[in-house]
Amino acid sequence: MSNRLLEISNLKTYFFVDNQQIPAVNGVDLFINEGETLGIVGESGCGKSVTSLSIMGLLGHTPGKVVDGSIRFKDSDLLTLPEDKMRKIRGNEIAMIFQEPMTSLNPVYKIGQQIGEAVRLHLKYDKKKTREHVINMLKLVGIPRAEEIIDEFPHQLSGGMRQRVMIAMAMSCNPTLLIADEPTTALDVTIQAQILEIMKKVKQEKGTAMMLITHDLGVVAEMCDRIVVMYAGKVVEEADVFELFENPKHPYTKGLLNSVPKLGLKSERLTSIPGNVPTPANMPKGCKFAPRCIEVMEICKTEDPELSQISNGHQCRCFLYEDEFVKEAK
Amino acid sequence: MFHYTIKRLLGIIPTLFIVSIFIFMFVHMIPGDPARLVAGPDASYKDVELVRQELGLDQPKVKQYFVYLGKILQGDLGTSMKTKRPVFDEIADRFMPTFWLTIWSMVWAIVFGLLIGVISATKRNKWQDYTGMFGAVSGISLPSFWLGLMLIQLFSVKLGWFPTGGIESWKSYILPSVTLGAGVAAVIARFTRSSLMDILREDYIRTGRAKGLKENVVVWNHALKNAMIPVITMTGLQFGFLLGGSIVVETVFSWPGLGRLLIDSVSFRDYPVIQAEMLLFALEFILINLIVDVLYGMMNPQIRYK
């Protein structure tokens, strides 16, 4: 087995708004091995982004707070790391790409300044070396005229170009883990494909592990080695990418796969999962997915299933497979 | 940027021309007879008429205006009716005290306004924020004559640290500039706070933090430069107002500045002085607006002038 790079256990991140506590992430367990690409899939509001912000320690400026669990990265627990040590990891060991390329770059600084800032901070390069490095990074992500773009401002670039700049910025200090939070959602389909291609290439060249957060199963199939499906702040299924697409277990995963439009199938309307994600204030008592589940049983309405192993590397949180669960003899 | 500045500088000429018409009209609408004031209350009707002719006030208004305009173009602002000195000298004497008072006030205002604004925005809803905003509301609400008198009472009369008025040394500048600057500082603090709070919610601030930058760097470099864009406009306007000379503060501190010159010349119906002062204020405002626009372009790359 390859080396564990990141291991999250029992992560609970709650939001405190108006004297209410809202469990955005409610006991998430997942891991990423070195050089591996993990996809995190789920609908909006299932806790994907909050998980990534918890890893980065960027919740400090939101009403959110990690209340329980641990996030082990290499040899340290990120949740107990002091802020100055955490800063040395952010942007250096773990870098992040965000969903909104249009607004994620500072409008008053040049591209080169924004990428160079991280390079000078973490790699301690001098001015000249930083500039060379930034130009190389821009070339790596396929930006034409890199020598000119470096001195341009974000508003002079298109959305796709800005996302390339974001990737260049994230990769500039050779992180061991790259977290990409819906990196292609805001882009045109053709640009999406280019950006994914670039991410793949950069990842292969640098051997970076990646956590790819998305709701797009096409992106997952294209990019990932392993997939974690999240629902209502919890992991409901986890499997190898081929296993998950061929042999989905959880009714939610099946629903997600069925709601992808397929070419050649003549169907009058798209299949969808009925209902909505429950609001945190309105969480059902048993299994969180029970009210929307087409295979719901009596037990689902009162008890919450555990995440258990079905076969090697395939875990699922559902009562349907009680008999199949591999009893771990510990 | 250079061409833009030249173009804007040339644009000042027609603006000032129009401004001069309005100033002339308004000044001549002030009720009261300057010829009578110059001749004195005991002068006979004939003497008053003689003075009127001498001052050119018997001529039609349009002609008076063109005479006035012609003189301005030759750099002649006329002679003060009250002191019989050239208006230029009158204003020149008063300009520097007001100018330096303005500079001192703006230095206080910008330093303290920014500091309080940034602290309030970053410590939102904590005691630092409440204290800062209490100070800012006080700064806006306290009338400057009252603040001035209180400062004189405490620091000049009781403690004897600073003179009560006039210009004697650098110490003379402290109390009046603090009085003038308090209101401006308060406005700058409130503007900075609200602008910075908006900016701190932007995605690129999160990007900065995700890069591993220190929070201070994120706030002072990444956020403040963006937050300054609206603050600059407001600060420029305040600067313009102060340069005109504060009538209240200059009176409280017996300051020999433009504000007091204005109030003296208005009560004496000293037309040439009033006109020249108003023209100067207009020019100051136009220049400050130009400076603000140029600064804007430097701060915000999305507005680059052609």
Image: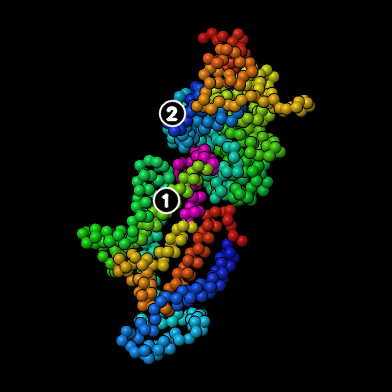
Q: Position of residue A107 (x, y in %)?
A: 56, 48
Q: Residue at x 35, y 86 (%)?
A: B39
Q: Which of marks 1 and 2 is in front?
A: 1
Q: Which quadrant does the N terminus of chain A fall into?
A: top right
Residue A48, placed above or below residue B37: above
Which class describes the residues within 10 Å of circle 2: few (<14), some (14-19), or many (20+)? few
**Disc number at residue A80?**
2
Magenta segment main secondary structure: helix
Percent x, y of residue A25: 51, 26
* Location of residue B139 in the rendering, given as x and y in whole percent from the top left corner: 35, 54
Residue A121 sits above or below residue B101 on the image? above
Instruction: Provide residue A308's location: percent of width, then percent of height.
Output: 57, 14
SS at mark 1 in the image: helix
Rendered view: A56 above or below A325: below
**Magenta run includes residue B214:** yes
Query: In the drawing, does residue A156 fall left or right of residue B133?
Result: right
Q: Name the residue under label 1.
A: B190
Tell me the quarter of the picture where residue B276 sits.
bottom left
Looking at the image, which residue is at 36% across and 89% down? B45
Residue type, mark 2 in image: Thr
Looking at the rendering, the stretch of residues picked out in magenta corresponds to B203-232
Identify which residue is drawn at 50% across, 73% down: B22
Cα separation, mark 1 vs mark 2, equals 37 Å
